[in-house]
Image (cartoon, grey):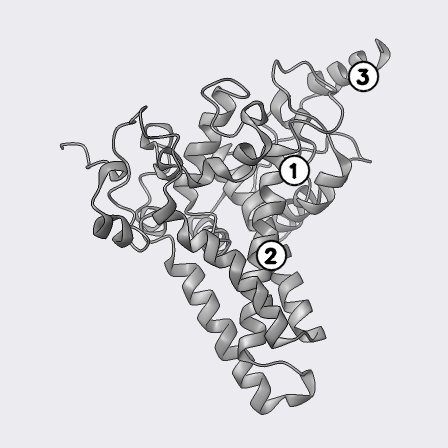
Amino acid sequence: MPPKPDSTNAPRGSALLRWIDTSGQSGSPDPANDDRIDWLRALPFVGMHLACLGVLWVGVSATALWVALGLYALRMFAITGFYHRYFSHRTFRTSRAVQFAFALLGAASVQRGPLWWAAHHRHHHVHADTAADPHTPRKGFWRSHAGWFLTRGGFRTDTSRIGDLLKFPELRWLDRFDTAVPVALAVLLFLAGMALERWAPGLGTNGPQLLVWGFFVSTVVLFHATVTINSLAHRLGRQRFDTRDDSRNNLWLALITFGEGWHNNHHFFPGSARQGFRWWEIDLTWYGLRTLQALGLVRDLKPVPAWVLAKADANKAGR
């Protein structure tokens, strides 16, 4: 089959269409343009942030805050447990139905589809903190935090890195129409708020309020928490292992990202479903995966090998 056309030089109308259908953005790399921010494609990202200002008009309620917090936690687990530890690193096994269910939850995070996410993350591990790493902090904080996400090259999915995932048509659909799930979530939140206003007015919420807090605010906070691992976890913290990159362990980042802040651990041995290698290294994603395993929903969680723990002990003793 001939390669799909590259979206970086596509007409403006075609670029707008790719807000909905991303099927045309898997073309060949274009070194002259790939590092440029695609401002037209970035408009929804900017709009998400501006929509958070809606809190000034819709007010706040305990109901809206709990919904926002709950959706942050649920979607963060889908990103860390499945987009990252499952789709990107294959550190455990599960059924196709559970795989798809958590792919849906991850897609609701507005961090694109699972194939795009896994392809970029696998590329990052191969080229961590080199010139080929799109989100190394060596290129600047803003670039590593969010700028890379908005570049023309950043929108592309390198399918050569995800051959093991391409066999699932439902995952390919989620990647192609990566705005479908977020839009559905936004609509459901608005309708739920309207229903609560009518049938449970004591909860003090309504459609616009649940939409702003439950979708826009929760999603934007979720995004920035997730990408602190790109920007801050390669700058702030301690290095237990010599990984020949800048990855670090950081408790505070681990708390807000459900264990992803044990980033130096992860870069030294990415093949484990557990990133907090010691019992005191809080890893909420690991606890969640253990719970799913006890319920029979996932299996074969890959542990931290004994030789890795011995290496950690040796490094500690040598300091």
Is residue 296 in view from this perspective? no
**Left of 11 or right of it: where is 216?**
right
Residue 74: image quadrant is bottom right
Separation of marks 1 and 3 at Cα, in angstroms: 21 Å
**Left of 2 or right of it: where is 222?**
right
Q: Which mark is residue 74?
A: 2
Query: Which residue has dot 3 on it?
Result: 313
Is residue 161 in view from this perspective? yes
Residue 164 against residue 187 in the figure, above or below: above
Three-letter amino acid code of the residue under disc 2 = Leu
Residue 279: image quadrant is top right
Q: Quadrant of the N terminus?
A: top left
Three-letter amino acid code of the residue under disc 3 = Asp
Residue 58: x percent and y percent? Answer: 60, 76
Query: Which residue has dot 1 on it?
Result: 260
Residue at image x 82%, y 36%? 280
Q: Which is more N-terminal, label 1 or label 2?
A: 2
Separation of marks 2 and 1 at Cα, in angstroms: 15 Å
Residue at image x 52%, y 40%? 146
